[in-house]
Image: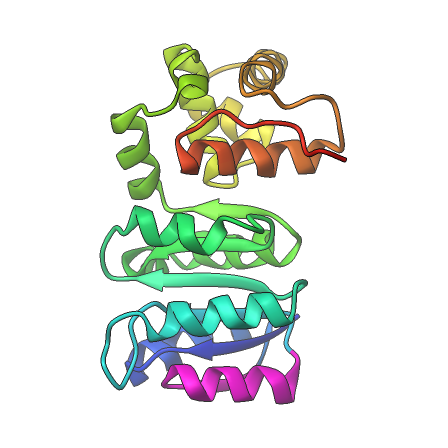
Amino acid sequence: MRVVIAEDLVLLRQSIARMLAHDGIDVVAQVGDGGALVSTVVAERPDLVIADVRMPPAFTDEGARAVLLLRDRFPDLAVVVLSHVVEPALAMRLAADRPARFGYLLKDRVLDIDEFVAVVRRVAAGGTAIDEHVVRHYLGAARGAGLAALTERERDVLGLLAQGLSNAAIAARLYLSERTVDSHLGSIFTKLGLPPSAEQNRRVRAALAWLSGTSAHPDPA
């Protein structure tokens, strides 16, 4: 896997690069602003980008805008976005069109090396990983007719799915059997209006429905 890191804090950027390299991941470039991120990705064509939301010169949403541009130009590019604070609206904006190959994490999560590297690999493989603090924000809001129809346990399962956990990991976290998790997911897909299709696609679309706070609908196709 080839990775480009975009982070203006040099120590954090270098720390991320070292932990990825230690895990056998090839960090091909490190940059400190959104413009450099775009030009570097065009030149290097990495598999995945790790980008801070706020970077020079204005420290508003330069990183997010660069990510949106790159995801539009390179649809297969995997992205893990880092933020200091919970910004659910921004997470939704970045994930809206293509929740696959997308991760949104608070920077504190980088301190858990094993978990961070696992998220990077999960997103690179086509998964979605949303920070648990964003998950809690949305579960607390309980918005949308589709989500309102879910039981409390189904919401727990969907929240963990949105973080990118596998069925086995969800089962372990909630002290359930995998069969029970499968049953809950089947009910969730039905209530959110997700018909049988490729399993990964349904999982991603369920996570997106949870993020948007609305029930999902089948694609016209």
The answer to whether 79 appears left or right of 56 in the picture is right
Residue range highlighted in magenta = 28-45
Magenta stretch encompasses residue 19: no
Residue 25 placement (x, y as % from top left): 60, 72
Tell me, what colour scheme is on the image? rainbow
Q: Is residue 24 visible?
A: no
Magenta stretch encompasses residue 33: yes
Q: Eyeballing the image, is 80 above or below 162?
A: below
Residue 139 placement (x, y as % from top left): 32, 28
Residue located farthest toward the front when viewing the structure as drawn: 220
Residue 13 placement (x, y as % from top left): 37, 79
Q: Is residue 72 visible?
A: yes
Residue in view at x 38 percent, y 73 percent: 63
Residue in view at x 65 percent, y 31 percent: 202
Q: Eyeballing the image, is 58 above or below 83?
A: below
Q: Eyeballing the image, is 161 above or below 12?
A: above
Question: Would you identify the image quadrant in which residue 109 lies?
Answer: bottom left
